[in-house]
Amino acid sequence: MIKIIKLINNYKKCSKCKKIKSSEEFYGSDLYCKECRKAQVKEWRIKNYKKYSQKRKERYKKKYSIKRINCFEKREREKYCNKCKQWKFKEKFYKRKDHKDGLDSWCKECCNKYSKKYRQENKEKIKEYRKIHKRDRGENYYQKVIKPWQEKNKEKVYAKDKLKYHIKKGTIQRLPYCQICGDFNNKISGHHFNYSKPLRVIWVCPSCHRQIHLNKLDHSQDIKSIKEILEKEVSHAEAMSSLS
């Protein structure tokens, strides 16, 4: 009797085709069998094609619009590493001027791993390169290079030393930003338009300082206006030194 009950539970009658079939041919507790349900869905799609197409488009837009938004947010904050193939913050990439975004295509971790492998595998090449390109950073280098340059450019050396002295003393304060591009940088230095006036200085970042010495920014309006101000006005430190 128990076996008969089990056999009855394993079979089911379809309310559409009215055939007795096994429970595997039904979707869970559905009254229609799989074949009848598929045929019904096809008929509904043919009759209501416009409604079906609109719903499908709406689902597609919702799914892929979210993905696109997430991609744009990642590009603003993060970058894709071509080596480890992961999204990482832009702070974890080295700077590189050759690329459009100004960052390397590999992250810092991948670059460091590659450099370690290269050093271990090519120790002899590195030793030979260092022997050829190494400079003697000692008394010989000072006597051959630095000392003759200082003797030729005494005004420059005097102006730089005087500016350093007044910065340490506190009569002059170094600005935390570049007066040309407005970039905040720890390596801001003073540029002298005239070395005979050592305390009349414009505070500049390294990139702008390099471009001024290459005569790329001398013709700009900002620098011309700054030169006129420095020629007319006298700085506080120079006024104090003239009184003493």
Image (cartoon, helix red, strand yellow):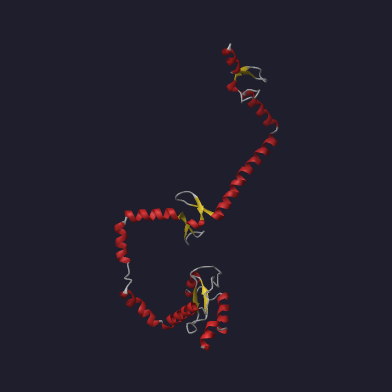
Q: Which residue is depicted at the point 32% across and 64% down?
A: 130
Q: Which residue is depicted at the point 29% across and 58% down?
A: 124
Q: Is residue 186 left or right of residue 46?
A: left
Exactly how many numbered labels are in the figure? 0
Residue at the outermost top position: 1
> Which quadrant would residue 230 be assigned to in this image?
bottom right
Can the viewer see residue 235 in this picture? no
Residue 225 location, x and y as percent? 58, 78
Q: Is residue 225 left or right of residue 210?
A: right
Which one is nearer the viewer's eye here, 19 or 219?
19
Q: Which residue is depicted at the point 41% across and 83% down?
A: 154
Can the viewer see residue 162 in this picture? yes
Residue 183 location, x and y as percent? 54, 68
**9, above or below 143, in the image:** above
Which one is nearer the viewer's eye here, 105 or 186?
186
Residue 196 location, x and y as percent? 48, 84
Q: Quadrant of the N terminus?
A: top right
**125, above or below 228, in the image:** above
Q: Which residue is depicted at the point 64% across and 40% down?
A: 59
Which one is nearer the viewer's eye here, 46 or 55?
55
> Which quadrant would residue 175 be assigned to in this image?
bottom right
Residue 19 location, x and y as percent? 64, 17
